[in-house]
Each structure stands twice: as structure tokens, then as C-alpha cells.
């Protein structure tokens, strides 16, 4: 039986070596989404060989399409460089008149023709390989390897099954079934450690990680060899990444049918998007599977590792070269300048002066700075947002107005943070004193009448401890009674029944009617005169107020971005009340799938995994029922209960530490503004950005002039607005993002007095008398020894560390900001159980289907037979 499988398997694998995967082959390259669909269909039929054939080809063909695009764009860029004079016109750049402009556009047309001809020749029609976003997501999540590991396991190809499973798991480290599969594989006979390899590993990252491993074991020669090899691969990968940015324009949430920019504005929009993408390559290349965050200061840190590796290998000239290269990024780094001074003494000042930084890095930095200047100009002239991904960018590159604004924002944020910190200490003291006097705590929490003042009349009514959890707060006085009534009127005038729930008027309970409206729809209705525009603007402004308050209260290091905003009302259906036992909104978690039977929450789609914080702004209290509740992960044990009222906000972290729901509304109408926030700007609500643009457009010239005058008179800074073997496989978490900034590692160095180490130099005399020259040697930052040697940074940040010979841990430690969940003893005495009739989310995968460009893409659940 095994022989038959092997022969048939060989007959399937051989076609993989045929010319259809060669970019220059006349054979038509089959679209990888069709191959993926075919493999999924074969998986459902348990045709394992067909699964392997088509899934492997899908992976290869996808890589081929990418490589062809890179090769064509780079080749055409070299053949049609804008710096060369145009034949017959003797000009190379536009700006000197119509003839010069024609010469410039001639280059544009020639490059477009070159790229189009190259890609068409090697891939066929450019639309032939367009795939749906859903299929792209599956490949980013490495889902094909989940199917492959099952198929290879079924035909007893354990080495390939292990490699596929390991490759999938690296990108999905929270996948419990795959973790169990890998543990199972490790216990199987015939499985070797080298089988656990990443089939999607990028060469430069693999060498970097190997270099760090050798470095931490004091194998500095091998470490330097790997770091150097990784740097060569890095600059190649950087060129490829930048070339791939030169793709189609992304309308970024706008309807392309309504896009009506002129020629130069269109070119500007597209080129700014391309430049921003190229700048983001530094983040893309610093990211690797299995890490929530990219390595901070990735490129510069490699020269830091290198300079110390060469020092320990006694290759001082190389150490000087790498130290000078690092200083191109951080010229004022004190420790690296000390290291450079030490190396210069060792080799001699004259010789050291002839050693320069690496030319490839000089060109890289020069090109990057020019791009940043253009992007900042786009920000100033057109308001095109640009977030600089690099920590090494000189301050003078940023426009002065933006620098001043950011400085003012930081000062304001620091002041608010300090005030909140002091206030929190006072509150904690008050709570502790109150606990001493109280022998019991009522299960249903009644907010304090006179809470502490936060700002502008906003009171902190309850903290996390009082709400028996973590990352929770209850605020009062956030908006006024008049504002509450205005928003409630807006909801009744503009809200659609079933909005946001595919038109279902009773999505959460058959006994209630649900209606809602988003910010953008409210603004559009205001534009059409169907609702007061001032009401839509109020909706926008008040939700922004809540964002700022929660951002300040939780003392976040990075800004909150809106992920979704919804003005909603729940109305009791009188004839359907009876003896209700259900909830108005079932207990759930905002960024993961709650499985209450096992007290677990699975962070994977279809959950909104990018959500980080949530806030609910209540508008009224004149209804029965409808209390907000926090529960344990069992979705039954209530830990806190809040009664809605006008101006009250409940804010909380969107993770599994805060399961929550809403009790049944048995009479009247309950209205609130539901807000979800993300720390990842990539998931910012595009509709809200459109709404903001529309509101700006509706501003009258008089209002604009008044605003300018008021801003000129004000001296205060403005705040910036800123699946598996044997188990299941298929729909897994897409890597979300990720924080933009790695955690900083504290440095301890002696600033008052440098470490001294004697260097013996032989004197030029017959007796060979030794002369001792004392030099200030810097300390090794990557080793935990007390030797006074040159410093090497262990974190990939901008500051060199001064802990001698500390082992490399660059960027691998992330601050855990979660606090331990604190509950009062009285809470367990009065636990309340609520019945949740909604069916709990099960740990089984579901089938999704989508259609795009006449192609279908499907994802099926995997189950071991």
C-alpha cells in the first residue's frame, strides 16, 4: 500500500518541476487562487495527493507572480531611469517648460510600457492573476500549510507534515490544536529536529536570528558571519519591497467612481501612497512570524551587534567601520562614540580616520530622508497623513509646525497623565479606607454620588478595583443633558432598523427592536437636509471627546484610533415581553470568540481581533432593565453591574479580561453610542475619515475665518487629532498588528566615570620595555560580565547600553501592561447567575465563500478522521 502511494505521489510531484513555474516559460502560469480552491475541494473529498499537488503549486505560483513583478519593475527602472537625458530633447526632468514636461512624461510612458510588456510576456494578462482579498488573507495566515500538514500526515510523509505544521504555527502561535500536533509529532518515531523548519523563512531574517543565537553563546566569529550575510540579503529584500509598492492606487475607503482629482492631484495622491509604502518597508522587513511587534531599529541594531562581534574577534578596523555606520543613524549616541574612541586608540588615530561608514548605508539613509521630506511636504500642503516608522529620523526633517504641535501634545499628555496618576493614588487610598469600614459589598454596584473630578466636570465614578476587574472605568458627566437629548433625537430621526446587523431588526433578542446609525450616514443625511447637520457634527465631536478621555485615563503610550462608531437604540417590544429570561445582548468579548463552556476566548476571525479598547456613552435612563454587566469567562457569574444614565461612560479593554453583556430591556427605549478603538492605525475606521472630510467641506468661509482668527489669538498649543492533524485547520488569526513601537529596555551605565582598562604597548627599545597606556574603554552592553569593554546594544533601540557583556535580547522583551485581576472577597460571596440563551461559540471551523473576478474562493474546516 505504501509503495503504491509513493509511486502515485511521485507522479503528482513531477509536474511541479515542469516549465509552468519558470517566469520565462511560454506556458501559462495558472492563478494560485484557482489552485487553492481545487486543493480545498480535494481536501473535502480526502484526495490527499491532489491536495498536495495543487496546494504546493499554489504556493509556488504565488511566489512566481511576486518575483516576476519585482524583476520587471527593477529591470524597467534601470532601463528607463529619469536621470538620463531624453533622446532628441536633451532634458531629463520637468520644470523648464512644456518640452521638459514632455520629456518627463515620455519616460513615464516608456517605463509603463516596459513593465506592462514584461509582466504580460511572463504572466499573461495582468488581470489573470488578480485574486480576492480573502484568498490573500489565507496566504498571509499561511493557511495552505495547515492543509498540507494534514495531507502529508495522511500519506505518512512525516518530515513534510512536520515542516508544514511548524511553518503554520510560527504565524499562528495561539493555535492550540497545532501546538498539540507539534507535540504529537515530537513523540513520533522517525521525526528529526531538523524537520521543524520554517518553509516561509526570509533569508535575511534567518541569518539575523542565527547571528543573535551565536552572539548570545559568545561565538562572535560565526555571529559576525551571519550578520554580514543577513545584511546583504536585507538590502536585496528592501529593493524588492520597494518595487512591489509601485502597484495600483488604493482608494483607501473612497469610492473610486466618485474620485475626481485632476492630473497632478491624482499623481500626487498615488505617489504619496507609494512613498509611504516604501517607508513602511523598514517595518515590514523588521517583522517576522510569531512576533507581535517588529524588531525596533532593526537595521541599525545589526551594525551594533557587528561592531561588538568584531571587537571580540580583534578585528578593530571592521569594528570601527560598523561603529561609524551605526552613528549614521544615531550620531549623538554616547556609548557608541565611546566605543569608537576606544577602537581608534587601539588601531591608531591616523589609521582610524581613514576608515569610513559603509557606502550602501549612506545611500540608504540619503534616499530615505528625501522620501521623508516629500511625505512631510505632502502633509503640510495637502494634509496627507504620514507616520514616520523610523526612530532615527533627524528632528530637522520634520516640519517645524508639526514638531511644535507634537511637543505641545506631549507636554499636555504628560501633564494629564501626571494629574491622573496623582488622582488615582488618592482614589486607591480612599478605596482602601472604605474597605476597612465595610464588611460586605453589594453585588449590584451603586456608583458613588460624589466621584473624583477628572476634567471639565467629568467624574471618575468607579475604578477597575471597584468594578471587580482590570482595565475598567466608569465616568459620569462626559456630556450634558441637552447633548444627550440631541443625540437621542438624531437616533430616532436617522437610525435604520437592523443597521450593522444585515438588516435584522431583532439581531440580539426577538423581544427587542434594534436601530442604529454610523457617523458617516448621519453626516450624509445632514448633507441632504434630512436631519440637522449640527446633530451629525455633535455625534462626531462627542465620540471624539470620549476617545480622548479614555486615552488619557488608561495612560496609553500610543493613540487610540476609532475602529467603529455606532449610535444605537434598543426598544422593548411590549407584546413579546412575557416571562423573559434572555439578555438584550448576549455576553461576549469584543476582540475574541467567547467559549464559555471551557472559560476560554479564541482570538481569531470572525472576531474583530484588532479592537483594543471599548467605550459606551449612555444617553438616557428612562427605561426598565437594560443594565450593563461584566461577567467571568463562564458568561454567567456577574462581577459588576452598571445602570445607564445620560452622560455616563463605561470604558474597558476589549480583551478576554472583560466579558460583558446587556440585561433585557423590558420597557421603553435604551440609547447609547457604542465605540470601539484600536491601537493599530491600519484598522482606523475609513468611514469616519470620510465623515470628517465631509464636515470640513460643509464649514462656511465665515466659520473658517473665525477659526483662523481665534487660533491666532490663542497662545495655547492645539492637541493633535490625531487547523490540524490531526485536528482542525483553516480559519485562523491574521496577524494584526502590531504595536508600532517595541518595548524599551532600561539601561544602567556609569555616566560619571568611564571604565579604565590598561593596554600594553611595547616600546621600541632593545630591552622591550612595555609602556602602559590607559584608555577609557566602553562597556559591553550585551554581556552580564563586569569587564570594561566596548558597549554593544542588546535592544534594538536608539540608546547604547553599558552593562558589560550582556547577552543579546534585542527587542525580545515586551512590556506586559496587563494588571492582575483584582476582586474583592465579598464578590465571591454574592455571585449572581444570569442565563444566556444565545448559543455559545464552538471551536469548530465554518465554511466561507466569496466571489471576485468570476473566481470562487472557499475555506473548509479540517478534521482528523
Image (cartoon, rainbow, N blue to C red):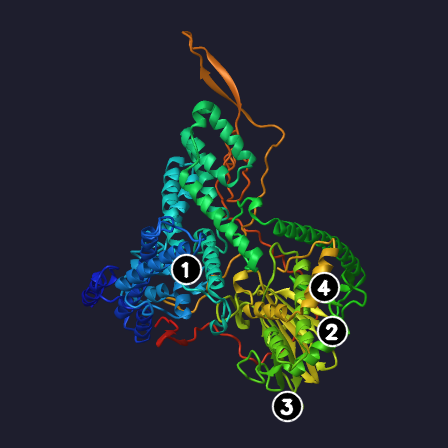
Query: Height in image: 751 above or below 210?
Result: above
* Distance from the alpha carbon under mark 3 to that under mark 2: 32 Å
The answer to which image quadrant residue 32 occupies is bottom left
Compare marks 4 and 3 and give the one earlier in the sequence. Answer: 3
Say which residue appears at 53% left-offset and 81% top-offset.
502
Q: Residue furthest top?
A: 766
Compare marks 2 and 4 and give the one earlier in the sequence. Answer: 2
The answer to which image quadrant residue 855 occupies is bottom left
SS class, disc 1: helix
737 to the left or right of 114: right
Q: Which mark is residue 169?
A: 1
Seen from the viewer's position, the closer of residues 354 and 848 is 354
Q: Which residue is mark 3?
A: 576
Quarter of the figure that contains the C terminus: bottom left
Compare marks 1 and 3 and give the one earlier in the sequence. Answer: 1
Estimate how packed mark 2 is, as few (under 14), some (14 to 19) or many (20 or more) residues with alpha carbons within 10 Å.
some
Q: Residue 760 at x, y = what percent?
A: 47, 18
SS class, disc 4: helix
Quarter of the figure that contains the N terminus: bottom left
Q: How many marks?
A: 4
Estimate how packed mark 3 is, as few (under 14), some (14 to 19) or many (20 or more) residues with alpha carbons within 10 Å.
few
Q: Give the number of the mark in front: 2 or 1.
A: 2
Q: Which mark is residue 483?
A: 2
Q: Residue 131 at x, y = what percent?
A: 37, 69
667 to the left or right of 369: right
Q: Give the number of the mark in front: 4 or 3.
A: 4
Q: Residue 816 at x, y = what percent?
A: 58, 54
* Distance from the alpha carbon under mark 2 to that under mark 1: 50 Å
Amino acid at each position: 500500500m505504501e509503495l503504491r502511494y509513493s509511486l502515485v505521489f511521485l507522479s503528482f510531484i513531477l509536474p511541479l518541476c515542469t516549465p509552468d513555474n519558470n517566469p520565462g516559460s511560454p506556458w501559462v502560469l495558472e492563478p494560485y487562487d484557482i489552485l487553492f480552491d481545487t486543493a480545498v475541494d480535494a481536501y473535502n473529498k480526502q484526495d490527499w495527493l491532489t491536495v498536495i499537488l495543487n496546494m504546493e503549486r499554489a504556493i509556488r505560483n504565488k511566489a512566481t507572480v511576486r518575483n516576476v513583478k519585482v524583476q520587471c519593475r527593477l529591470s524597467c527602472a534601470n532601463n528607463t531611469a529619469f536621470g538620463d537625458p531624453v533622446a532628441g530633447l536633451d532634458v531629463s526632468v520637468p520644470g523648464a517648460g512644456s518640452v521638459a514636461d514632455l520629456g518627463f512624461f515620455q519616460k513615464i510612458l516608456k517605463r509603463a510600457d516596459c513593465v506592462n510588456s514584461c509582466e504580460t510576456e511572463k504572466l499573461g494578462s495582468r488581470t489573470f492573476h488578480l485574486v480576492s482579498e480573502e484568498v490573500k488573507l489565507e496566504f498571509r495566515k499561511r493557511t495552505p500549510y495547515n492543509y498540507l500538514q494534514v495531507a502529508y500526515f495522511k500519506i505518512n510523509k512525516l518530515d513534510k507534515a512536520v515542516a508544514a505544521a511548524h511553518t503554520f504555527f510560527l504565524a499562528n502561535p495561539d493555535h492550540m490544536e497545532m501546538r498539540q500536533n507539534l507535540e504529537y509529532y515530537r513523540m513520533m518515531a522517525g521525526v528529526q529536529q531538523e524537520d521543524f523548519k520554517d518553509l516561509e523563512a526570509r533569508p535575511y531574517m534567518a541569518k539575523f536570528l542565527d547571528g543573535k543565537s551565536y552572539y548570545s553563546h559568545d561565538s562572535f566569529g560565526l555571529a559576525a558571519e551571519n550578520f554580514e550575510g543577513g545584511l546583504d540579503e536585507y538590502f536585496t529584500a528592501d529593493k524588492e519591497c520597494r518595487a512591489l509598492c509601485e502597484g495600483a492606487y488604493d482608494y483607501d475607503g473612497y469610492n473610486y467612481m466618485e474620485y475626481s482629482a485632476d492630473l497632478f492631484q491624482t499623481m500626487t495622491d498615488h505617489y504619496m501612497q507609494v512613498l509611504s509604502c516604501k517607508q513602511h518597508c523598514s517595518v515590514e522587513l523588521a517583522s517576522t512570524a510569531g512576533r507581535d511587534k517588529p524588531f525596533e531599529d532593526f537595521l541599525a541594531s545589526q551594525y551594533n551587534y557587528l561592531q561588538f562581534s568584531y571587537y571580540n574577534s580583534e578585528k578593530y578596523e571592521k569594528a570601527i567601520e560598523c561603529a561609524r555606520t551605526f552613528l549614521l543613524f544615531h550620531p549623538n549616541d554616547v556609548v557608541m562614540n565611546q566605543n569608537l574612541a576606544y577602537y581608534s586608540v587601539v588601531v591608531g588615530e591616523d589609521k582610524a580616520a581613514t576608515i569610513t561608514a559603509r557606502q550602501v548605508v549612506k545611500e540608504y539613509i540619503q534616499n530615505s530622508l528625501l522620501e521623508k521630506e516629500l511625505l512631510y511636504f505632502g502633509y503640510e500642503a495637502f494634509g496627507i497623513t504620514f507616520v514616520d516608522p523610523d526612530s532615527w529620523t533627524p528632528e530637522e526633517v520634520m516640519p517645524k509646525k508639526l514638531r511644535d504641535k507634537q511637543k505641545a501634545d506631549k507636554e499636555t499628555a504628560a501633564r494629564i497623565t501626571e494629574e491622573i496618576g496623582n488622582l488615582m493614588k488618592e482614589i486607591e487610598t480612599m478605596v482602601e479606607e472604605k474597605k476597612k469600614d465595610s464588611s460586605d459589598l453589594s453585588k449590584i454596584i451603586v456608583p458613588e454620588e460624589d466621584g473624583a473630578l477628572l476634567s471639565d466636570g467629568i467624574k471618575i465614578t468607579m475604578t477597575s478595583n471597584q468594578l471587580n476587574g482590570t482595565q475598567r472605568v466608569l465616568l459620569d458627566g462626559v456630556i450634558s443633558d441637552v447633548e444627550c437629548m440631541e443625540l437621542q433625537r438624531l437616533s430616532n430621526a436617522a437610525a435604520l432598523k437592523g443597521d450593522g446587523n444585515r438588516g435584522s431588526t431583532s439581531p440580539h433578542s426577538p423581544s427587542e427592536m434594534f436601530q442604529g446609525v454610523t457617523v458617516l450616514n448621519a453626516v450624509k443625511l445632514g448633507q441632504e437636509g434630512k436631519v440637522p447637520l449640527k446633530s451629525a457634527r455633535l455625534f462626531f465631536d462627542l465620540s471624539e471627546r470620549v476617545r480622548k478621555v479614555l486615552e488619557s485615563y488608561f495612560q496609553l503610550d500610543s493613540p487610540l484610533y476609532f475602529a467603529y462608531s455606532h449610535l444605537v437604540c434598543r426598544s422593548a417590544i411590549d407584546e413579546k415581553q412575557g416571562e423573559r429570561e434572555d439578555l438584550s445582548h448576549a455576553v461576549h468579548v469584543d476582540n475574541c470568540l467567547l467559549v464559555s463552556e471551557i472559560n476560554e476566548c479564541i482570538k481569531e476571525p470572525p472576531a474583530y481581533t484588532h479592537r483594543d479598547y471599548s467605550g459606551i456613552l449612555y444617553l438616557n435612563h428612562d427605561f426598565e432593565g437594560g443594565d450593563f454587566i461584566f461577567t467571568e469567562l463562564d458568561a454567567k457569574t456577574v462581577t459588576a453591574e452598571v445602570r445607564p444614565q445620560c452622560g455616563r461612560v463605561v470604558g474597558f479593554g476589549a480583551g478576554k479580561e472583560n466579558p460583558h453583556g446587556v440585561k433585557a430591556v423590558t420597557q421603553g427605549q435604551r440609547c447609547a453610542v457604542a465605540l470601539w478603538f484600536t491601537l493599530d492605525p491600519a484598522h482606523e475606521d475609513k468611514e469616519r475619515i470620510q465623515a470628517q472630510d465631509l464636515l470640513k467641506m460643509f464649514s462656511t468661509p465665515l466659520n473658517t475665518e473665525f477659526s483662523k482668527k481665534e487660533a491666532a489669538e490663542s497662545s495655547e498649543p492645539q492637541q493633535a487629532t490625531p487547523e490540524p492533524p490531526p485536528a482542525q485547520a483553516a480559519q485562523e488569526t491574521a496577524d494584526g498588528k502590531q504595536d508600532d513601537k517595541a518595548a524599551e529596555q532600561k539601561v544602567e551605565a556609569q555616566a560619571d566615570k568611564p571604565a579604565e582598562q590598561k593596554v600594553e604597548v611595547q616600546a621600541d627599545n632593545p630591552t622591550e620595555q612595555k609602556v602602559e597606556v590607559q584608555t577609557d574603554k566602553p562597556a559591553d552592553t550585551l554581556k552580564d560580565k563586569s569587564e570594561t569593554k566596548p558597549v554593544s546594544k542588546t535592544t534594538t533601540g536608539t540608546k547604547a547600553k553599558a552593562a558589560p557583556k550582556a547577552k543579546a535580547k534585542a527587542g525580545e522583551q515586551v512590556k506586559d501592561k496587563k494588571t492582575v485581576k483584582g476582586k474583592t472577597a465579598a464578590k465571591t460571596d454574592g455571585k449572581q447567575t444570569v442565563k444566556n440563551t444565545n448559543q455559545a461559540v464552538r471551536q469548530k471551523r465554518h465554511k466561507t465563500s466569496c466571489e471576485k473576478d468570476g473566481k470562487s474562493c472557499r475555506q473548509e474546516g479540517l478534521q482528523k478522521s
